[in-house]
Image (tube, rainbow, N blue to C red):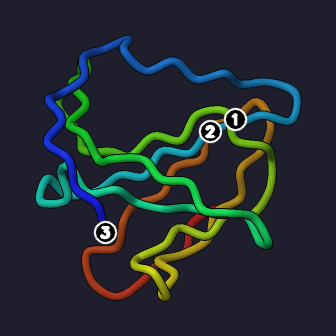
Amino acid sequence: MHEHAYGPSETGSVVLDLGGDTGALIVYTSPDLHGREIEISREGERRVHSAVRERRVRDGSFHTAVYPDLPSGIYTVWWDDMTSAGTVSVHGGGITEFVWPSSGFGVAS
């Protein structure tokens, strides 16, 4: 697992390119995962990662990893190198949300 020390992002600092066959994934975590890189992958494809950052928005503050510009499909969210935290279905034109399990593992769609 890689970790980074990123500062918070502000409202409007993340751009998602949605439409056609392209969607996005947002993984919500607890603040203690700040800086951790969470990997995702579609079956048979290489993993991609995004760092958990504090996102400050009008309604408060959240810790998320954001994956913009994802082709539609079923993705595995990886707990670690060998263990899945769950699977999600990303659809073109939409945003899929996944809540990082606080204990055990979960599935979202």
x, y percentage for residue 33?
19, 59
Instruction: Work out whether 13 lies above or below 29.
Output: above
Cβ–Cβ below 8 Å for labels 1 and 2?
yes
x, y percentage for residue 63?
24, 44
Q: Which mark is residue 24?
A: 2
Query: In the image, 94: left or right of 22?
Result: left
Q: Amino acid at mark 3?
A: Met
Q: Amino acid at mark 1?
A: Gly
Helix, strand or loop under label 2: strand
Which is more N-terminal, label 2 or label 1? 2
Query: CA gap, disc 1 to disc 2?
Result: 7 Å
Cβ–Cβ below 8 Å for labels 3 and 1?
no
Residue position for label 1: 94
Query: CA gap, disc 2 to disc 3?
Result: 22 Å
- Quadrant showing the C terminus: bottom right
**Residue at figure coordinates x 77%, y 71% from the top left:** 43
